[in-house]
Amino acid sequence: MIPTLFVASMLIFAIIRLPPADFVTTLVAQAAQSGSSSDQASMQALRHQYGLDQPLYVQYGRWIIGFLHGDLGYSFEWQRSVGPLISAQLVYTLLLSLMSMVFMWVVALPIGIYSATHQYSILDHVLTFIGFLGLSVPDFMLGLIYLFITAFYFHQPIGGLYSPGMETAPWSLAKAVDLFNHLIWPTIILGLGGTAQLIRIMRGNLLDILGQQFITTARAKGLREAVVVNKYAVRVAINPLISVMGMQIPNLISGATILGIVLSIPTIGPLLLRALVDVDMYLAGSILLFSVAMLMLGNLAADVCLAWVDPRIRYQ
Amino acid sequence: MSLSESRRLTLQSPVLDVPAEADLADEVLTTTADQRYMVSQWRLIGRRFVRNKAALIGGTVIILFYLMALFADFLAPYSVENRQFQYLYVPPQGIHLIHDGTIQPYVYGIKLTIRQSDLRKIYTPDTSKVVPIHLFVQGDAYALFGLIPTDVHLFGTADKSTPVFLLGTDRQGRDVLSRILVGSQISLTVGLIGVFLSLVFGTIIGVASGYYGGLFDDIVQRVIELIRSFPTIPLWMGLSAALPPHWPPLLTYFGITLILSFIGWTWLARQLRGKVLALRQEEYVVASDLAGADSRWIIFRHLIPATLSHIIVIATLALPNMILAETALSFLGLGIRPPLTSWGVLLQEAQNIETLANYPWLLSPLFFIAVAVLAFNFLGDGLRDASDPYSVS
């Protein structure tokens, strides 16, 4: 995991240094728009000040060594150190992803069980179709539709995470509730695609398992159907879902990124977009590296979870 | 057993019911039985596929969509450069079919009023003015397929001063329907080229990695792991931000397809490697090897054809993701850039909540995207089920 992260950091650095422009070019372009011109000498001075005139490996080395010491570099655009700038955004991204994951499980499990135990019923067909729809319409389109509905029918201002005045208030129950209210729709939008996927997999798994012999045995023993399904079948059918959970983490982080931009929620999305456009390299690089790290930690958590739930699985 | 299940079982495989008939006919194998026995794998796949109604509908919709993209300039009533500045943000006009007892599609004229409360321009249908819609009218000049210069459009109005905007206009007075139709050319082909590139890389690398194994396999697997350890949207954003803004549109277009396939090939390579690892043990491959066939022969004559149905399925299921990725990137302003038009570029104008509330018809590309993606998913699902014609489910 650590070596992968290391190679990933090199790849990220290559990507963010790929554009022929650097931040000084952005500054010059902005200055040109407001009418002032910049001369070659001051550009060179700026490059020197930001360390952009050093060879690439020196720039990379400084960044990555700083990273190990907890210093994520300096954002040219915001004139601040990157660490404090992105910490809140990272937390919100994580919070949104986690809430979506909880939503997915809470909704998908009962529906999946119902679909499997009532196979080919009308509700099963309806749920399967809705699931397909949820799988096909991506987060940012759902986000746009949600924007449209709130703007058109409710004339409500949306975006942000807190009601006016709450942002700076100290943490209290009221603030947490306010945050939750602002996050609930983004959570549902983000989780819908994954929910559809989980329902399909749960339905398929459970159908397979319900046809196996130990289920017939359990029924023959005279156990109640609820016990047979919930304690015997679901217990086994749930394992593949945990590995699917690991696979969904990249989608959640991707979704949280783009949904943040669409719904103006301070996830890493808006910050990353701006940093990329303005070639604010340390900011963009740190955000990308953290998104990779989040993904890897998520996968690790899913693996641990799987080993914990299913004692047959042991990693060497 | 429910009805649909029993029907499936009896239909599942023509090969299986042949031995029973052959037993009856024991000595003389009738010609019909003989022919039934010869049903090829592809025929079986075809039969299975045709039974899946959703997949058939999906496939039809996709063919229609690509035809639409091919004839976009002809179907669109206006060219995308046609800016009609006296008609900014005109809402969609309802189309009426019957006029004075005869079938004559028409729209009402457009009446402009200035709302006093906020001085905003309001366009309303002018019910006193009937604007008939004609087929094959002359309009903006264009070149069909980029070759045949013409100015005939499928429909439009005879009089230039009374235009028809079935899906409204945007902030520059361009017809939204025309832009969607022309935008489909880019949106639908970006995925196609992206998938094609992914297929080329993915097939070659995946098959070689499974066939040769060893160090090459190790390196390929590590590289795939590395690329897959990135969340896709942030990685795509980073890569497309690296495309120089001064590139000409066509180069940007190919840049985007390259970026899309940069992640796309990893899926295919992974799956094909697994398939090839299993196939390598098959007797016919071993036999071919023992008979002295070189590895190129084995890969291109045995391994790739054997995995072909799998490749097609993955490609079909990857296409909608590519279309969505292009849309998302262009929507963020990192993908296709104006003057090129794609569905994502169109949606970019619908980003602002103010715009959405006042001019909701700018969201209409969403409908086309959703239909295209849904159709591809249905088709891909049908192909996946059909690609293994011996499975029972």
Image: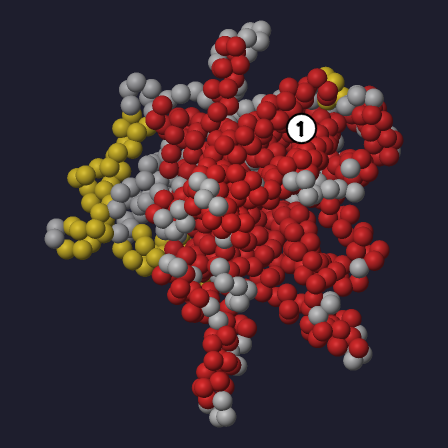
Q: How is the image coloured?
A: secondary structure
The residue closer to the viewer here, A227 or B147, is: A227
Q: Residue at x 50, y 56 (%)?
A: B381
The number of discs equals 1
Q: Residue furthest front?
A: A221
Q: Establish if B277 lies above or below A103.
A: below
Q: Chain of mark 1?
A: A
Classify the position of the N terminus of chain B by image quarter. Answer: bottom left
Horizontal and vertical percent for residue B224? 73, 48
Horizontal and vertical percent for residue B307? 64, 65
Q: Residue at x 54, y 57 (%)?
A: B316
The residue closer to the viewer here, A59 or B337, is: A59
The residue closer to the viewer here, B145 or B141, is: B145
Q: Can residue B323 be seen?
A: no
Q: Residue furthest top?
A: A170
Which residue has dot 1 on it? A275
